[in-house]
Image: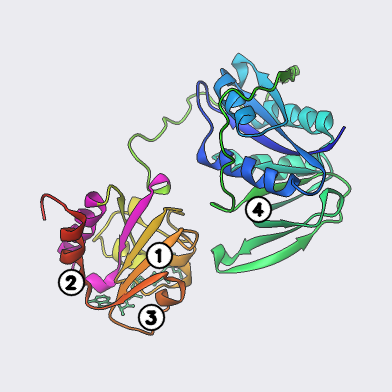
Amino acid sequence: MSEHVLVLISAAPGATLRAADREALGAARAFAEGRGLAVACAVIGHDVQAVATEAAERGADRVLVADAAELVTFNGDRFIPLAVAAIAATEARVVIVPRGPDLLELVPRLAARLDGASVMGVVELRGDAQDVSVVATAFGGAAHAVYRFNAPGPRILALAPAVAEAPERVAGRAVANEPIAPSEVVPRVEVVTPAAPLEGPRLEDARVVVSGGRGLGAADRYSMIVSLAKALGGMPGASRAIVDDAWATPAQQVGLTGKIVVPDIYFAIGISGASQHMAGCSNARCIVAVNTDPQAPIFRYADYGIVADCLEVLPELIRLAGDPGA
Ligand SMILES: Cc1cc2nc3c(=O)[nH]c(=O)nc-3n(C[C@H](O)[C@H](O)[C@H](O)COP(=O)(O)OP(=O)(O)OC[C@H]3O[C@@H](n4cnc5c(N)ncnc54)[C@H](O)[C@@H]3O)c2cc1C
């Protein structure tokens, strides 16, 4: 039997694979290929068949499923033994945990339980399953560090956003579910009232983000950022400088202490490109910057740069984007 790279998914009831789950499967496949490894996926939750089916259709060679009513909300005390069982069943040395609300609890606990080791923010896996090393982000994405492992147990890895492509979905590609039986666990802590999921579109999921900064010059000009975002079917973001000045809301802040966005296209308009801002957007597929200062740091990151006054460029971009209200 081949060795496995295992992707560990905590799934919400009736959910389908999230972008982060698909990226994790893509990273697992990329690592497995050429190393004689297979990809396994463990899906843990309640009413998770759609996730299990899609995992198989996106190339998982084995799909292990723990599906039980008590797994309807994430609880580390219940989840960890099932994850341990999945790791044992697949003999995985490399375990990838997709981004999600449970990540910060799950990754270190799992590594500690199995005498393994964990690294967060991984952007690259090197070596082979027995001697993997990883490159991961540091200082909020401003730098990279390389890690090697000495722990005897498995390597539990959390990926940085957008480091892998989702594997292509092949409809009808089926793999029989391998059930993992939930063990009898009395959790040390229980969720009494789960947090209500946020409603409406999330900045983190937007395919287009248009962010404004202090270069806008005045609060009322942020409406042009909103108009351009709307015209492009995206969402407006902001630098911390203008959130601090209340030109935009905290929910719109991009960066180290704001949201991390991974859109296909990111507009940085009147934003200098401080490292704390770039920590939230440097993984965008394409960055377009508008700034009057040709030496502004943002141009080091930008795929397209416009050295110009944003107050002249914005109305033109809005017109080109075809905003009916422009
Ligand atoms: C611990 C910590 C955490 C932080 N977290 C974050 C964070 O999460 N997100 C974040 O954004 N920042 C964060 N910051 C702040 C960060 O360091 C910067 O101060 C901030 O990003 C600057 O915002 P800005 O680019 O809008 O403003 P500025 O740095 O003032 O830049 C304005 C830019 O606009 C240009 N400009 C001026 N006029 C025009 C014009 N008419 N047209 C076009 N361009 C023009 C200027 O050339 C300049 O480059 C953090 C800082 C610290 C210390």
Q: Does the residue labelled 3 lie within 8 Å of ligand 1?
A: yes
Picture quadrant where residue 39 is located: top right
> Disc 2 marks which residue?
311
> Disc 1 marks which residue?
287
Mark 1: amino acid: Ile
Q: Viewed as shown, does residue 133 lie left or right of 104? A: right
Q: What element carries label 3?
A: loop
Disc nearer the start of the sequence (1/2):
1
Residue 2 falls within the magenta-colored stretch = no
Q: Viewed as shown, does residue 110 lie left or right of 238? A: right
Q: Residues within 10 Å of mark 4 (few under 14, many from 20)?
A: many
Q: Residue 296: which numbered mark, if any?
A: 3
Disc nearer the start of the sequence (4/1):
4
Mark 4: amino acid: Met
Disc 3 + disc 2, Cβ < 8 Å: no
Whole-percent x and y of residue 262?
46, 53
